[in-house]
Image (cartoon, rainbow, N blue to C red):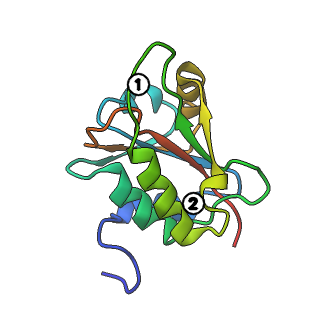
């Protein structure tokens, strides 16, 4: 156990967050995301039983968002014709605002298949049990 480290952050995840450098990206994936196939060239960390918001909140306590890009947080855009509602995005923006003064201005969207391509180049992918759809979020690391 360490002081100041959220309990939800496993030793493996803490190590990955420490290893990541400026502009490296990490995906926090919902339960439907193909984490293992997308993460063949990255590190896949299982966080079964947890949702994206609680993982996002814990990571942002330790992880600076990139200030050299306009949108260091990327969400998977809802597919045209899909009437999916994404109230979880509002939750993400509230969490982000607690740790980054830019708040919702840090958040952008990426078309679904482009998001998959970007995820394949991420340093790590965290697989959660999140049930909300379009709940995937990609973070780009900044500097301290």
Q: Position of residue 18 (x, y in %)?
A: 54, 65
Q: Quadrant of the N terminus?
A: bottom left
Answer with the quarter of the image where residue 22 lies: bottom right
Q: Position of residue 68 (x, y in %)?
A: 79, 56
Q: Position of residue 140 (x, y in %)?
A: 63, 51
The answer to whether 46 is drawn above or below residue 66 in the figure is above
The answer to whether 58 is drawn above or below residue 24 in the figure is below
Q: Residues within 10 Å of mark 2 (few under 14, many from 20)?
A: few
Identify the disc placed on residue 37.
1
Observer-nearest residue: 79 or 65? 79
The structure residue drawn at horizontal position 29% and vertical position 50%, both measured from the top left corner, is: 51
The structure residue drawn at horizontal position 67% and vertical position 63%, both measured from the top left corner, is: 102
Q: Residues within 10 Å of mark 1 (few under 14, many from 20)?
A: few
Query: Which structural element holds mark 2?
Result: helix
Observer-nearest residue: 55 or 13? 55
Query: Which structural element holds mark 1?
Result: helix
Residue underneath mark 2: 19
48 to the left or right of 84: left
């Amino acid at each position: 156990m360490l002081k100041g480290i959220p309990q939800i952050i496993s030793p493996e995840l803490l190590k990955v967050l420490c290893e990541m450098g400026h502009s490296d990206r990490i995906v926090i994936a919902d339960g439907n995301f193909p984490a293992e196939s997308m993460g063949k060239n990255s590190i896949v960390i299982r966080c079964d039983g947890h949702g994206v918001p609680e993982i996002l909140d814990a990571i942002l306590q330790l992880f600076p968002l990139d200030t050299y890009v306009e949108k260091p947080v990327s969400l998977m855009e809802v597919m045209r014709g899909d009437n999916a509602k994404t109230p979880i995005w509002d939750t993400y923006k509230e969490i982000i605002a607690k740790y980054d003064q830019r708040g919702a201005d840090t958040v952008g969207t990426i078309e679904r298949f482009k998001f998959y391509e970007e995820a394949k180049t991420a340093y790590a992918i965290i697989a959660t049990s999140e049930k909300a759809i379009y709940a995937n979020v990609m973070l780009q690391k900044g500097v301290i």
